Amino acid sequence: MGSLAGLLQSRRGWSCWRRLRSPSFRFPNSPAAAAAAAHLKRAALWPGCLRGMEEGVDEDEQQKQQPPPPPPPPRVSTSYRAIQRVGIAVDETNVLPGALQLIRKLRPQWETERVKTKLFTEGITNKLMACFTAENMGDAVLVRVYGRKTELIVDRANELRNFQVLQDHSCAPSLYCTFENGYCYEFMPGKALGPEHIRQPNIFRLVAHEMAKMHRIHTNGSLPKPCLWHRLHKYFNIVKTEFPRKASNSGLHQEVHIPSLEVLEEEIRWMKEHLSQLRSPIVFCHNDLLSKNIIYNKAEGHVRFIDYEYTGYNYQAYDIGNHFNEFAGLNEVDYSLYPSKEIQLQWLRHYLQAYKKLGQEDLGGGSKSRGESGAVSEEELESLYVQVNQFALASHFLWACWGLIQAQFSTIDFNFARYADIRFKQYFKAKPAVTSFKMSK
């Protein structure tokens, strides 16, 4: 079958096309007709496919008259590579035996007695162990074991898809295999940062640039929906089911002083109505950028993000606001460390400059236009500042609900109930101040 454009170049084909475009024409009800309708619909979305034919312009002449279109922005592939699957389940409470089993599959050339291991203890969702033979851990394989009941709060299939997307854009390490309750991947050399590092200008400039790079990963031609509301409702529904039933048995009510479920439900309604009106762009977000999820490679002068469980399309301002909340730390939360407006504006300027330049590069802009595209107005800066601080409220609320769920199910040694209490309190404390901020007109 010839191309649609070739068909339309014939007199008969063009006559058919004119008839098809008539308002009175209706396709017959058949599979073939439906396929033809879909094909023509796609053609209508192809700028320039039919341009000039109605006007009687020769195709060669038309091509001379029309400037070449800019190259399309990069797309995220919808066909994901198959990942090696290993039929091993690793005991979450005793990771070592299962990790060594996996290493024998992935690195059969390694001598078992030479394999060293390191258990990372900072994570509060999963268990993580490195297996390596080199002294500098340069050949390390990371074995990540899902935490108990984390499938309630994490879409594991989506996590692996997003891992591959990030890998394709040089934002993630290599993914080696999956197993029954986790996956193995490449060790990323560098230093995991702490709250004291991410407020340093030389570091937060790199973080802002890396976040802009992630935010410029494009959807595959569709209009993405923010994951925030689905995730928030999902977590809250689990809280409604689990919290009242188990709190009386565990003494959790004495640990966590939260408002009634009715009040919390009303807050979710308010957030969705209010924050949705701020017109924050929907971009590809990390959604969990605490300091330990940032790896700083001093030798190469860059940072990389790790842990992609919560990655997905979301509001740009949410991702930044969530990161600013993490300036307060995790184990000993101190909101006096929340970045001042001065620090935020510096951070946001770095971010917007990088975000604009990357956007211009996607469209194939020249060096001059790229330089000009990095200019950031005060109005843009102030608007993003308002959006970020108001979306930070949703971050507090979501992680508070997450903490209540983890308090019921997690075996990790962390006081999730206390953490939930802190995040709820900060939500209600910050709300009056940040909602008084007004967007630039």
Image (cartoon, rainbow, N blue to C red):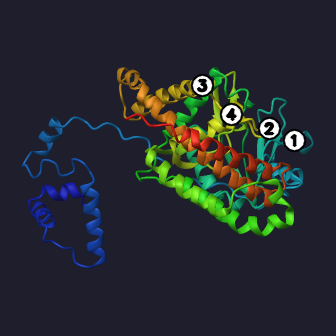
Earlier along the polypeptide chain: callout 4 or callout 3?
A: 4
Earlier along the polypeptide chain: callout 3 or callout 1?
A: 1
Earlier along the polypeptide chain: callout 1 or callout 4?
A: 1
What's the residue type where badge 3 is placed? Ile
Q: Secondary structure at mark 2?
A: loop
The answer to whether residue 50 is above or below residue 382 is: below
Q: CA distance from mark 4 to mark 3?
A: 11 Å
Q: Dot 3: within a 10 Å radius of its alpha carbon, few (fewer than 14), some, or many (20 or more) residues?
A: some
* Res 14 quadrant in image: bottom left
- The residue depicted at 53 percent of the width and 54 percent of the height is 270
User: x, y percentage for residue 238?
Assistant: 68, 64
> Which of the image's four quarters has the N terminus?
bottom left
Q: Label 4, on which residue? A: 327
Q: Secondary structure at mark 1?
A: strand
Q: Label 1, on which residue? A: 117
Asked if the residue under mark 4 is in contact with the one under mark 1, i.e. CB atoms within 8 Å, the reply is no
The answer to whether residue 305 shows anywhere in this view is yes
Q: Label 3, on which residue? A: 343
- The residue depicted at 51 percent of the width and 52 percent of the height is 226
